[in-house]
Each structure stands twice: as C-alpha cells, then as structure tokens.
Amino acid sequence: MKRRLLVLLLSLILIVMGTSAQSEDTLIWSLVGGDISTLNPALATDGTSLTVISALFDNLFRVNPETGLPEPGLTSWSISEDGLQYTFTIREDAVWSDGTPITAADVKFTYDAILSDTVESPRKADIGAIASLEVIDDQTFVATLEAPNCTIWGSAFVNLPPLPSHMFEADFSDFMTSSFNTAPSATSGPYMFDERSSGEFVRLVANPSYYDGAPAIPNLLYRIIADPATLNQALQTGAVDYGFIYPDQFEQLTQRDIFNSFVYPLNNAPIVIMNYQDPNNLQNAYDEDGNLNELVPNQFFADIRVRQAVAMGYDKAALAMTQGPEAGSVPLSGPIVPAFYEAYDMADIEPWEYNPERAAELLEEAGWEMGSDGVRVKDGVRFEVDLVYSKLVDLWGNAALIMQDQLGQIGIRINIIEQEWSAYLGNVLLSGEFDITIVGFGGGTEIDGIAYNLLYSRNLVLDGGGFNLAGYVNPEMDEMLDTARTLPGCDVAERAELYREVQRIARDDVAYDWLVSTTQVHVLNQRVDEAYIGQWSGVPNWELIGWGFGQ
C-alpha cells in the first residue's frame, strides 16, 4: 500500500510539472518539507522559505564558498580602526528588478522595520548588535556597533538583505500583511518572482537588471516535495535536477552516475529540545528593567538531573549509524560542530554516553519513582510527554523512535506526534508551546551561529525575539558568548579556546540534548555543467557558482 502511494505521489509530481521536467531552460530545485511561509527575508525562519529568498534578494555581501569569509558583492566596505564603524558603498549599477535604484535608504528602511515594534521579525536580536545605521548619501551608509563584534558578518549583516522601501508604507503599517511577502514584485537578486502554487512550487525567472548580469539558467522552479523518499524517486527519474540529501539517502540512489555530488560536513546541530519553562506560562529572560525573571519551571525537564538522564537514556552511537556507515557521523557534545575543526573538541569534552543504569539513578534522585505500569511518577504526575515534531529529516524521526523505545525502558513514556512542517513551525517550535521536540538548527558561516542563537538568554522565542528554543537562561553562558564575540583583534586561536568553554557549559547543563553530527550531499544532475558547490556556498549563490546548461 505504501509503495503504491509513493508511486501515486511521484506520478502527481510529474503531471503537475508538465513540460518543466528536463526543460532546457529550467532548473528544477527540490524543497523537502512544507510550503514556504513567506518570501520576505526580514520575516522568514524556515529553510524552504530562506532557500527561495536567497535567489531573490542579495545580501550586503557574498560568501566565499571555500572560506566562508565575506567578499564584496552588492556593496563594498571599509572598517574603522577601532572596529566599530563599517562604511558600506552600494554599487552604482545596482537596481531593483523594476528598475528603481537600490539605495542606502532601502537598507535603513529594512533596519528600522526589523527593529520596529509593529514588525514581528526573528532578526531583532541579531540586528540589535548594530547600535545605529546612518545614511550618508544614496550609495553610502554607516553601521555603528556598540562594541567590536567578531561575528557581525554571520549575525547582523547576513540578516540585513535590503528590501525595496518603495513597496511598503513608510510607517511599516503594511509590513506584516503586504502581498509583497508572498509575491515580491521587486527583487535585488539574480532571479525575480514569477508564480507560486501553494504547497506545490515556486517559479522564478532570471532578472535581466541584475548588476552582475542575468544568470545562465533562465528559469528556476522550486518544487515542494513531501519527504526524503519522494525526493530520491524524483532525483532518480529526473523529475528534479538538484537536491541536498543525507548520506543514507545518497546510498539509496540506484543511478548515481547521472549526478555530480558534493559532500561536506554541515554547520548544523540536530537537537532534542527539552523546555525549561512551563509551556503554558512562558516569559522572557529579563523584565523591562533588565532584571532576571523568575521563570515558571517545566514540570518534567527543569531539573538538570532529568535532562542528564534523557541524554544518557538512549543510544546516540546507534543513531549516528542510521545515517549510513560512510557518513562519519559522531555524537555531539554541544553547539560547536566538526565543520569548525579549530574549536571542535571531542577529546576533552565527551558527549553523553548511553548509560541507562545511571539515567535511572538520576531519575530516582530527582524524585521520579517507577510506577506499577512502568511509567515514573512524581507528586502524582506521570512522566508521560508528547514529543511533537515534523519528519522533515529522517534523522529526526529515527531519533524519536529510538528515544521512545529506550527512554520507555527507564520509565519515561514518549508519545510521538508528527505534524506538517509549516504547522509545526508556527504552532509548536516558534511558539514555545511544547515540552519536548526534535529539530535541526544551522549556524551559517559563523562558529557561534548555533551557540549564540540557541543559548543566549536574550534570544528567547517569546514575542519573536530570537531562537533560544529551550528557554535556556545562564548568565555565565551569556558572558562567555559576549567575550568570544567581542574579543579585541578576533584572534582565531583565542576565540576557539573560548568556544571550547561554551561547548563544556552547554554539554554539562544539557542546555539542549545534542544529537549527532551531520553530513550533506549536494546532488546535481549532470545535464547542468560548469557546476561547483563549495563548503560555504550558501546555495543557491548563482552569481558565484555560474551554472549553465550543457548542450
């Protein structure tokens, strides 16, 4: 029955694509998961939306695909000797796709919109690192920092792709509701929006006004695909040209010779999130006067002994093997992942090992006694929780099943509830209204991209403030992150030592239950030639990759 359903789904995909599949002027790009939520870069949080956005809107800078370092693109810049002022100059030939010049006023508008109380942007915490942004003239603006920031490119500046101010009201009153958010009529990147069918596809066309010239591929079709198995089928049959998959999926492809593949470790941490707060009484870390709030603790997971028991209560080494023997996956100890080998430390900071006996002892110490039905009880409350997640990635589903089985053996009953990605993202993950969940979090090109977003106290998700999804509040962690981000001179070795301490604290606290390292395979049909994807390409980065169709 499942096989017939898969065949039916694939057939429907091919029917909807019509003549687009294997068209000489169209690249079909897969988006696995739910529908896009928005095409406004100031509002997007999900990977499917951000992937499409990256082809529509240019950042202030480009990322070198090999080093991850910033390079001139839409702008060039100079930095003051004290590291506080960044003076940007926008290219004179840069225009919006409707022909309107891209100006410093557009950057200022975007900056002010993100920080406005009327705009619910998840970029507020990152953009807040910029103390002020001043327009000098049409081509020039100055961003001033309160303190030197070694991660400014991967935090604030990467989150400030300019928006066309002439498409919005000056007071931001339409920012959240504008039709621009799902059908942008002026873009700065190599592509323009053409059409969208909700839950099915987004079609883009080359931008002839792009300052670097129209991209080699005239049309880009993003196809929304329900799950990894369907993606593999679509890749194999040529229904899509490009996808990024995990090694276990790549091993399942039976005709690998029709693809070029590029394999890299990911700056991504799959995580089990155990909520520190009562999901029905969420608060921010600090009150309006800057004082720490007394958070209402989660009845299951606020106790560190319980979190440690969970971390030891299931086998992460077995989970790593589910990615395939060639993936080189290993259990993680914290937010610094193998992609950053300078700071990644497995020798001195070991991941939590599978130890169900010690996990059971910790639960007993925390007051959770085994009940007659095999479920632990404390103060009349059964340790039974709903693990709500979206099976966007096979690894998350594998982790959920292993946890359900092995944690169940030590008295923690896990009820697995799957949701469609878009619904899960808004109603569960970003609302904070859960006890436990599983997801993955990527950190871009910055070494602290995962750590700062997930661990910094002022990044709690309440009111759209950031991505501290667990409600983790630790002033010591905040101090370490601040020190590493503002280190004078930004010496790589000194910062690596600080991030090893961040790793140790995150591991010991079980701020999150860090799962296993991940590797990603970029798979591209060989009918696309001159293709190259680097470690930090930030796909799609058309102006760098320069893909063209072979004849």
Image (spheres, rainbow, N blue to C red):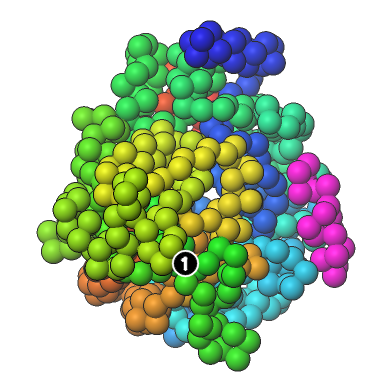
Residue matched to label 1 = 298
Percent position (x, y) of residue 246? 37, 32
Amino acid beneath label 1: Asn
Looking at the image, residue 464 sits to the left or right of residue 172; the answer is left
Which image quarter: residue 329? Answer: top left
Q: Residue at x 49, y 36 (%)?
A: 391
Q: Is residue 236 visible?
A: yes
Q: What percent of the width, then of the height, locates residue 111?
A: 68, 69
Q: Count of labels shown?
A: 1
Residue 220 x, y percent position in the rendering: 63, 29
Q: Give, as a single range, the part of the protein colored magenta.
A: 166-184
369 in magenta: no
**At which x and y percent is residue 174?**
85, 60
Is 107 above or below relative to 410? below
Which of 94/48 is in front? 48
- Quarter-wise, where is residue 201 in the image? top right
Towards the viewer: 316 or 323: 316
Could you tell me if residue 507 is visible in this image? no
Which residue is drawn at the image coordinates 59% and 48% (left, top)? Answer: 425
Q: Is residue 511 left or right of residue 200?
A: left
Residue sitting at x 54%, y 20%:
240
Farthest residue, direction left: 347
Viewer-nearest residue: 117 or 474 = 474
